[in-house]
Amino acid sequence: MPAGSFYDWQLSLVGIRGVYSALDVGCGEGRMTQALCQQAAPGAWIVAVDRQPEAVATTRARHAVDGLCASVEALPVAPGQFELTTAGHVLASARDIPRAVRELCRVLAPGGALLASADSESSARRLLDWHVEACRRAGLAHQARRAAEPSARDRFTLENGAHTLSRTFKTVDVHARDEMLAFPSVDALLRLYVTGLHLRGAPALDGPGDANALADRLRPHLRDIATAATELDGRVIVPRRSGCFVARPV
């Protein structure tokens, strides 16, 4: 998928050219903020929000927008100020999801909309299944069992998010997008795996040394599993389903 196209696709669902004020909650590296700046009405007021000060500072500097350091559960914004709020894969990690949803609704102007993106419960499941199998082959049965259990991401998904949003919003539409995570090689997949995915289901570790030791133990098993599933051109394909909700208060 070309960089930025997921954000463009989301914005196409809400008539972005007519939006003059937008709040990007959980701005991160500023990719949605950038898309808003490029596609909203000329002179639109764009505000980037994140709980990490570094993310806010970086996004402000890159895109010349206003920025606020805050959590989604307590937005320092007056009611009804924005025509559009965006929450990119934010709600699954919120400490209090119902409160976060109420805040995202509170700041919307009459006729406004929330764009809240999320993954499907099945998204990238192939990679998780490979990790569980790697744990089993490494003799880490307890970690394999824990890795297969629901994670924090499952608190807000394409399957259950509409129910959560409908408690606050009058209308909620679900839009799904199927795509592929294509790794050019098994080594490329392994580089991602050892940045943190190999830790899922692991007990508490004492430090980077333990994490590295665990990666060394699991890496050869995941390599064997992924190698058996490579395409003819050497790529490793992981299906991914994600999407977003368009929620309106009235």
Image (spheres, rainbow, N blue to C red):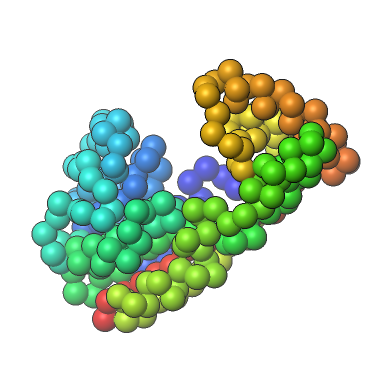
**Nearest to the observer: residue 34 or residue 182:** 182
User: How many circles with numbers are drawn on the protein?
Assistant: 0
Q: Is residue 193 above or below residue 85?
A: above
Point 11% across, 59% down: residue: 78
**Image coordinates for residue 150, horizontal then vertical, percent:** 58, 57
Q: Is residue 44 visible?
A: no
Q: Is residue 5 above or below residue 53?
A: below
Q: Is residue 81 visible?
A: yes
**Image coordinates for residue 43, horizontal then vertical, percent:** 19, 51
**Image coordinates for residue 214, horizontal then vertical, percent:** 67, 27
**Which quadrant does the C terminus fall into?**
bottom left
In which image quadrant can residue 122 be found? bottom right
Point 30% across, 75% down: residue: 168
Q: Is residue 28 above or below residue 191?
A: below
**Image coordinates for residue 182, horizontal then vertical, percent:** 70, 43
**Nearest to the observer: residue 167 or residue 245:** 167
Point 69% across, 44% down: residue: 142
**Nearest to the observer: residue 90 or residue 80:** 90
Farthest-out residue, left: 78
On screen, residue 175 versus residue 74, left or right, reads right
